[in-house]
Image (tube, coloured by chain):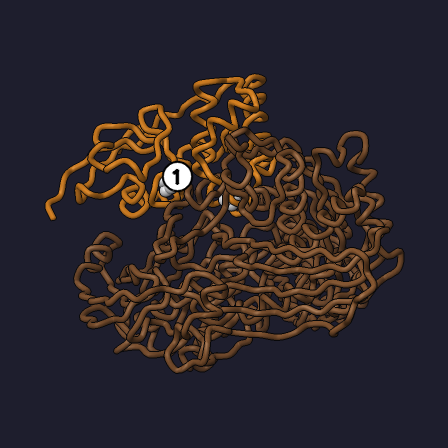
Chain colours: A orange, B brown
């Protein structure tokens, strides 16, 4: 099978790879880039475990062909903490016990991160609606919703974190 | 490190994150039919290379291989949709998928046997067997009741439900010429090892199973699966590491679902609501092969009196073979079914006598411990239930017009105990357990117990993932047993360490312990029962078209002493959503012709955040007699919630509910 060249910026770092055009972004991130924090939980784009932020918008990376990511900027769960410091949404998930097995967590974090970018003070209903594409089998969602509310409070109190820009080497 | 920190950083190591040099990816050619003759088969690894059968291990497993054991590859005919027929191996996951086309299979489809009743009448699905009855046993003692004025009969069905952990199954197998090492997403590395040893006829010393971070289990990941054996066999044959990661589609067709149990029940009662006896038949749809289905019907029958002091009981326990993927344990594993069946009858009796369902329940409770005619031992139910009604503000906040009650006894799987190893070295403590945590938070209770027993601060204590080389003997994390059994093992091992420290230093102090090197591997033998009570109350809202929304769901469970508030609450809230799911949407369904109707995780009914409300969780902390005072809890919500919710749906719709999930057509307003 012929290969295509893709250039992407992942968590602030540029890279280019030759890959099969049929490859999904989720597999590219996991198997080529080695960013295994992005998970795969289904093959019907229902579960959201694979959620990443592409050009500022949450997408399910299992529905994106790697070619469609060419020239884009991608943020994965590995890019949430800055200089070893947890971001507010990560801290909130830990403090409010918004995770158990951790498998849905990366997707939940990325979907929540995006929600809080769009809407700094989401209501409970808005949080539940915005996370409806992310399934969790362990937590019953209540603590996840609490975590997002708490992150929103932290952002209100302390402001958003600065995005650290990592230049390509 | 704070528990969970690696997961929020995306630094977990789940089995699909493990990559070994030279690793092959495995993909499985599966039967597209529920039942078919294999007229010809060419290509891939198949039953001509490997003829073995599966061993029944894990929860409810007999440890044996018998004539009903599933073959690792279909042999001459297929017995369920999704059954492994052949395996192919590629350099990456895409190439492995491509290679599926290289296998040529010619099937001659046969008429499948899809339901319990059909199975009872049909010719045997397996040649050489007499019928489709996997097991048929009576539990209890025959009795005659000619004097009870009220005799009620009804039939119920809990349809099959997928376990659906968010991380599907997966293994990586490798062989160095002497030893087979397998990493697995697991609730019991020990059971998987036992299964591989048994099924592949290997020596126990030559197999090591290591748990990877595990993204939920819910019963599925405690046993052996055909794909594990195939991956192990291929790693040994090709002398290269082999990875197999289940897709969600494969999960829904080919991994063991739970429930799939039906009952025809008759109760005999007085006009005062007192139940004098229960009889009936419990049927489990075992699917195409033995295993958990051999255990499930008797386990359900044994619990059929629920928390009530019913003096007579005689129940027939039957499992039938059908052309479906073999049934397995799913959170509760027989407990929710038994509770559902008796709770539905108690509500029926309340309606018959126009009594409040709470009053009928109280009429059947003892203030003393009680041993049921079916063998179930329970404590005094009445005081707990009366507390539950108070906690629920029953009669004020909730009334029987709209709210449904569920009252149950939770029977944790205690025997034969559990293993734990504690190793102190260089000022830090490592702990291994015989059962593998799949997200329940075992590290929390381990840290609490080490702090209490050895005085060592939690940040010095790390729970390790399961590893059969690290712990000599272990059982598994299922059946609401881990805090009870693994907790007891941690306490016993801590005691031994204390003794050694005293021997070395003359007295015990955490500083002394941490300055030395200690390593204790202990198996705590346990038997007997440690049953506990729980109650739920729920209120549903039903649209004219039959869409169900849960408005309220409260829980009150006796969890014994709480070792970790987060874990206890987390377990309960997560279980509630599974309990609701079983009632409102979750199902694995087939057409009569054997096509799978629920091929995606959405079709299988897993609920999302916008479909459930916030829950109110209350616990009673009545200490058990164990040194650490705990009781079981992991399965409480999947036992208690379905009965409560179904009753509420019945009240708000005015329609008698018998089966789960409740389908819109069962309750939509008649137009
Ligand atoms: S893996 Fe992408 S939505 Fe499930
Ligand atoms: S924490 Fe396990 S699936 Fe969400």
In the orientation shown, which residue stands out farthest toward the left? Answer: A2
- Residue B629 visible to the viewer: no
The image position of residue B113, as x and y in percent, is: 40, 65
Residue at 50%, 38% (x, y): give it.
B664
Does residue A9 appear to the left or right of A123 in the view shown?
Answer: left
- Toward which corner of the image does residue B329 lie, by quadrant? bottom right
Residue at 62%, 49% (x, y): give it.
B638
Say few, some or many: other residues with alpha carbon within 10 Å of mark 1 (under 14 / 14 to 19 / 20 or more). Answer: some
Between B498 and A111, the one lying in front of the other is A111
Mark 1 chain = A
The image position of residue B192, as x and y in percent, is: 48, 68
Between B506 and B80, the one lying in front of the other is B80
Q: Is residue A11 above or below residue B40?
A: above
Does residue A116 appear to the left or right of A153 in the view shown?
Answer: left
The image position of residue B438, as x and y in percent, is: 54, 54
Q: Is residue B309 above or below residue A124?
A: below
Please identify the quadrant where the N terminus of chain B is shown: top right
Mark 1 — residue?
A46
Between B646 and B82, the one lying in front of the other is B646
| Mark 1 CB near ligand 1 (8 Å cut) | yes
- Residue B15 visible to the viewer: yes
The image position of residue B56, as x and y in percent, is: 50, 73
Regarding mark 1 in the picture, which secondary structure is present there?
loop
Does residue B265 appear to the left or right of B47 in the view shown?
Answer: right
How many marks the image carries: the answer is 1
Residue at 81%, 40% (x, y): give it.
B389
Q: Is residue A141 above or below residue B19?
A: above
């Amino acid at each position: 099978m012929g290969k295509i060249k893709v250039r992407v910026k992942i968590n602030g770092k540029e890279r280019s790879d030759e890959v099969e055009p049929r490859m999904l972004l989720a597999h590219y991130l996991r198997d080529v880039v080695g960013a295994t924090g992005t998970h795969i939980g289904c093959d019907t784009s229902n579960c959201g475990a694979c959620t990443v932020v592409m050009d500022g918008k949450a997408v399910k990376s299992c529905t994106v062909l790697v070619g469609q990511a060419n020239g884009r900027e991608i943020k994965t769960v590995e890019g949430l903490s800055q200089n070893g410091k947890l971001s507010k949404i990560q801290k909130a998930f830990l403090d409010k016990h918004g995770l158990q097995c951790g498998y849905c967590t990366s997707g939940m974090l990325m979907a929540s991160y995006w929600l809080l970018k769009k809407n700094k003070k989401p209501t409970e209903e808005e949080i539940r609606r915005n996370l409806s594409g992310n399934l969790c089998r362990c937590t019953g969602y209540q603590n996840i919703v609490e975590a997002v509310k708490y992150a929103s409070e932290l952002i209100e109190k302390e402001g958003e974190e600065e995005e650290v820009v990592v230049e390509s080497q | 490190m704070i528990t969970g920190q690696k997961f929020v950083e995306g630094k977990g190591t789940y089995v699909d994150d493990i990559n070994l040099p030279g690793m092959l990816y495995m993909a499985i050619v599966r039967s597209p039919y529920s039942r078919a003759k294999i007229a010809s088969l060419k290509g891939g690894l198949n039953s001509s290379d490997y003829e073995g059968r599966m061993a029944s291990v894990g929860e409810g497993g007999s440890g044996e291989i018998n004539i009903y054991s599933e073959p690792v590859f279909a042999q001459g005919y297929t017995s369920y949709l999704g059954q492994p027929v052949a395996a192919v191996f590629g350099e990456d996951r895409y190439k492995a998928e491509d290679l599926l086309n290289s296998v040529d299979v010619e099937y001659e489809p046969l008429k499948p046997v899809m339901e319990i009743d059909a199975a009872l009448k049909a010719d045997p699905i397996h040649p050489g067997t007499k019928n489709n009855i996997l097991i048929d046993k009576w539990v209890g003692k025959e009795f005659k009741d000619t004097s009870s004025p009220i005799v009620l009969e009804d039939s119920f069905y809990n349809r099959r439900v997928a376990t659906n952990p968010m991380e599907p199954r997966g293994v990586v197998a490798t062989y160095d010429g002497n030893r087979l090492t397998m990493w697995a997403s697991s609730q019991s590395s020990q059971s998987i090892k036992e299964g591989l040893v048994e099924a592949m006829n290997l020596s126990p010393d030559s197999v090591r199973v290591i748990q990877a971070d595990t993204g939920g289990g819910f019963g599925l990941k405690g046993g052996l699966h055909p794909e594990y054996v195939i991956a192990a066999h291929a790693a040994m044959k090709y002398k290269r590491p082999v990875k197999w990661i289940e897709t969600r589609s494969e999960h829904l067709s080919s991994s063991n679902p739970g429930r799939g149990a039906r009952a025809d029940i008759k109760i005999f009662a007085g006009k005062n609501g007192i139940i004098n006896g229960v009889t009936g038949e419990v049927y489990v749809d075992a699917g195409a092969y033995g295993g958990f289905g051999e255990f499930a019907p008797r386990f359900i029958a044994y619990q059929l009196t629920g928390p009530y002091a019913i003096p007579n009981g005689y129940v027939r326990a039957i499992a039938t073979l059908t052309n479906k993927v073999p049934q397995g344990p799913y959170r509760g594993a027989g407990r929710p079914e038994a509770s559902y069946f008796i709770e539905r009858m108690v509500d029926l009796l309340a309606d018959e006598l126009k009594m409040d369902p709470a009053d009928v329940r109280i009429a059947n409770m003892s203030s003393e411990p009680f041993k049921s005619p079916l063998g179930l031992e329970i404590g005094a139910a009445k005081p707990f239930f009366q507390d539950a009604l108070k906690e629920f503000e029953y009669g004020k906040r909730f009334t029987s017009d709209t709210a449904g009650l569920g009252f149950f006894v939770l029977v944790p799987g205690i025997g034969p105990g559990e293993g734990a190893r504690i190793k102190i070295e260089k000022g830090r403590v490592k702990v291994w357990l015989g059962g593998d945590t799949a997200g329940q938070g075992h590290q929390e209770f381990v840290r609490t117990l080490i702090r209490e027993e050895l005085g060592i601060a939690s940040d010095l204590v790390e729970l390790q993932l399961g590893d059969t080389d690290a712990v000599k003997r272990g059982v598994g994390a299922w059946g609401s047993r881990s805090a009870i059994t693994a907790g007891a093992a941690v306490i016993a091992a801590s005691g031994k360490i204390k003794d050694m420290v005293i021997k070395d230093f003359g007295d015990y102090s955490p500083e002394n312990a941490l300055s030395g090197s200690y390593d204790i591997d202990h198996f705590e033998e346990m038997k007997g029962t440690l049953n506990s009570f729980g109650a739920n109350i729920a209120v549903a809202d039903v649209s004219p078209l039959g869409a169900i929304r849960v408005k309220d769901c409260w829980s009150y469970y006796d969890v014994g002493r709480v070792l970790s508030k987060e874990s206890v609450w987390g377990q309960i809230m997560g279980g509630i959503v599974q309990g609701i799911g079983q009632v409102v949407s979750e199902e694995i369904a087939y057409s009569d012709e054997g096509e799978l109707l629920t091929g995606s995780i959405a079709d299988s009914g897993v609920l999302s955040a916008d479909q459930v409300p916030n829950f109110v969780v209350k616990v009673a902390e009545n200490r058990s007699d164990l040194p650490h005072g705990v009781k079981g809890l992991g399965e409480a919500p999947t036992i208690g919630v379905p009965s409560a919710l179904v009753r509420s749906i019945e009240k708000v719709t005015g329609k008698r509910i018998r089966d789960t999930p409740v389908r819109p057509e069962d309750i939509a307003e008649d137009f």
